[in-house]
Image: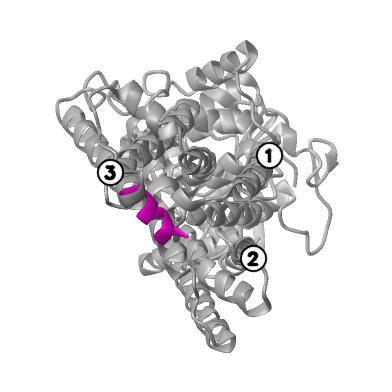
Amino acid sequence: MSVGHGEFVALLGANGSGKSTLLKTVLGALPLAAGRMSVLGRPLGEANRAIGYLPQRRSFDSGTRLRGSDIVRLGLDGDRWGVSLRTPKGVRERIAEAVEMVGASAYAQRPIGELSGGEQQRLLIAQALVRRPELLLLDEPLDSLDLPNQAVVAALVHDICRGAGVTVLLVAHDVNPLLPYLDRVVYLAAGHAVEGPVDEVITGETLSGLYGLPVEVLRASDGRLVVVGQPEAPAHHHDRHAHDHAHAHDS
Amino acid sequence: MPTTTRTLMTADLANPQLSWNLARDASEVLEYHFMVNALVAGSIVAVMAGLLGWFMVLRREAFAGHTLSLMAFPGASGAALIGVPATWGYFAFCAAGGVAIGRLSGPGRRSLSEQSALIGCVQALALASGYLFLSLYGGVLGDLENLLFGTVVGISDSQVLVLAAVAVGTLAGLLALGRPLLFASVDADVASARGVPARRVSVLFLVLLGLAVAETSQVTGVLLVFALLLMPAASAQAITARPGLSLLLTVALGLAVVWVGLGVAYFSVYPAGFFITTISFGVYVAVRVVVGVRSRHGAGGMAGRAPLVESPPPQGVIA
């Protein structure tokens, strides 16, 4: 399996199917159990300066007293030891550029903790973009956003992918907000993966084969897809997050 | 010794009276060497505790800071037991406490509830060890009041030098950690992905915090460290979200609190620690009230905020 330059690819799959794990492997944060992987033509972990990463949903405590632009700036030079007493013009311009790309100029100077979930998410995407990465890894960027904001952020990621030629690998729980934009999807389940265009992968036939269970895919009149029968009970939703967080912290 | 100092201040100095000429009052205060030492020591500690405390507040590690301050008790009693100066015990135990808390409760590795429980365990064990050291020592800890409430007006020239040396080292460490510390404090996952050794940074920070707390507790005492460690930083962060300005304000507030507190204490029969803490608290309350009133009146609030979704949501979405 490979993801080409400038593609917009979604990683889909049930809870615990390994979507976030795959993303962390691409980052070199987790070792490969078997097989080989190269990122931007280099071995795992060596291309991280050219990767923008947005981990699974984190929101800032309402008392976090730093501006949105400070959070964006950390993406640029937050890994450099020492302090910088002055902000060089180049740095200011890069921050403004990233903030403008996500359309957050109106509130980038406000304390991050006072912003809404959608606004925080845009600034976090700006943080991932500020180094002008070649590859953007987004872990559930639409999770915990309301539906209008999901649509807005999905369109935004698409614009960045097309406009700046950035390759996007995005983990999603629900494919629907992304349907108009995706080049391909990778569907993970039961230790296997299927990849291809949405229309070929998200079908009753393909998913039934993947899960080994009868799965139906229904298409609503507005184009939305509903997958019925996949082993994913809503009651497990919170468990999944607890598990994923523990996992993230172990890594 | 604070008792002798207090006698000096109240009886032998012929009852200093505050006049309305502040310049003359200040020059009177500065005529006494112990007051100069107190001001210098207080200023050193205000700068260092303010800056380290700023990160402590940002990282929500006030409980760790409190626990580190209590490390001074096993530090002082352990030092008495093996016959070395109490200051050594302060530094050794506070720094070791920083390592212990950092390694055990590693932020990012454990949940917040686990972290605070583990810090509580470290605190209880430290206090129990202090109690053991004290009973093995067999004597009375002569400096008990110093330990609890500080020695700011009884501080010697050599103590000032030690404070300055440790402060320079601690601040150099903080400067070196700089941006990665800020990054790991607000966003540990992304910082790690960017190659910041977030866990090592947080342990190093707790060691620096331990040293800062050990210094602060020599001036304000174990029980009042937050007067300089927490309240100026919390006030500054409530005033502004600009990190540079916020750090400068923290230092300015800390210095002002120490100078005014010592100045008032000189003309009063009550101890300096009380004034320093109360003024610091007063500043914090005033800031919160002003910030609260301003945000209720819309300044910097929701007014002028652009809506995130300007147009109706695109098709394909259930509204």
Q: Which residues are magenta?
A: B1-10
Disc 1 to disc 3, C-alpha distance: 42 Å
Which marked residue is nearer to the observer: mark 1 or mark 2?
2
Element type where label 3 sits in the image: loop
Crowding near the residue tagged with mark 1, few <14, some 14–19, many ≥20 C-alpha atoms within 10 Å: some
Crowding near the residue tagged with mark 3, few <14, some 14–19, many ≥20 C-alpha atoms within 10 Å: some
Which marked residue is nearer to the observer: mark 2 or mark 3?
3
- Colour mapping used in the image: one colour
Q: Residue at x 57, y 16 (%)?
A: A92
Q: Which residue is mark 2?
A: B85
Tag 1: amino acid: Ala
Q: Which mark is residue B15?
A: 3
Can residue B4 be found in the magenta stretch?
Answer: yes
Same chain for the residues under marks 2 and 3 in the image: yes
Res. A241 in view? no
Relative horizontal placement of residue B140, taking residue A128 as reference (left or right) = left
